[in-house]
């Protein structure tokens, strides 16, 4: 039942250390969140996986156009490894698993991993 307007209200409870005034001042602290850690997805070269498969994987799983996928594939071929993209941990792990599953399905020994960017 709400208080009636003609009934006197009871005073606000006194807070400890409030100096008897019934109010306290709390400093506002801004919450600072740091951006998520990023991880790069890396493909490793082998002597058996066809270049066409690598290009197709780069286009399908990393949304690279044909020219960019070809350049990354050549980097993997000549330097032994190439970065496919940089993502948050969960996205990078998912992309690694998708690439490895596609490679196993087509019976290729392609290796894909993620490392801190």
Image (cartoon, grey):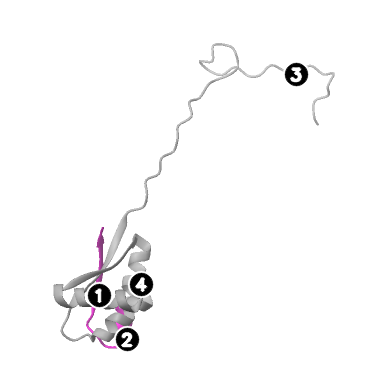
Mark toward the viewer: 1 or 3 = 1
Secondary structure under badge 3?
loop
Answer with mark 4 or mark 2, whichever residue precedes in sequence.
4
Q: Within 10 Å of the Cα at label 4, are there few (<14), some (14-19), or many (20+) other Cα atoms?
A: some
Q: Position of residue 12 (x, y in %)?
A: 66, 19
For label 1, the residue is 71
Residue 80 as seen in the image, left or right of residue 11: left
Q: CA distance from mark 4 to mark 2?
A: 18 Å
Q: Nearer the viewer, residue 83 or 23?
A: 83
Q: Which mark is residue 62?
A: 4
Label pair 4/3, CB-CB below 8 angstroms: no
Label pair 4/2, CB-CB below 8 angstroms: no
Q: CA distance from mark 1 to mark 3?
A: 77 Å
Residue 88 as seen in the image, left or right of residue 54: right
Q: Residue furthest front?
A: 67
Q: Which residues are magenta?
A: 100-117
Residue sitting at 15 percent across and 76 percent down?
78
Q: Is residue 106 a member of the stretch shown in magenta?
A: yes
Q: Nearer the viewer, residue 32 or 56?
A: 56
Secondary structure under badge 2?
helix
């Amino acid at each position: 039942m709400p208080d009636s307007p003609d009934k006197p209200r009871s005073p606000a409870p006194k807070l400890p250390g409030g100096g008897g005034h019934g109010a306290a001042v709390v400093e506002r602290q801004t919450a600072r969140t740091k951006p998520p850690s990023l991880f790069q997805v890396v493909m490793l070269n082998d002597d058996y996986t066809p270049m066409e498969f690598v290009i197709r994987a780069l286009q399908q799983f990393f949304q690279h156009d044909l020219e960019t996928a070809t350049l990354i594939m050549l980097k993997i071929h000549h330097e032994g490894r190439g970065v496919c993209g940089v993502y948050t941990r969960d996205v990078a792990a998912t992309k690694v698993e998708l690439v490895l599953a596609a490679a196993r399905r087509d019976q290729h020994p392609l290796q894909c991993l993620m490392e801190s960017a």
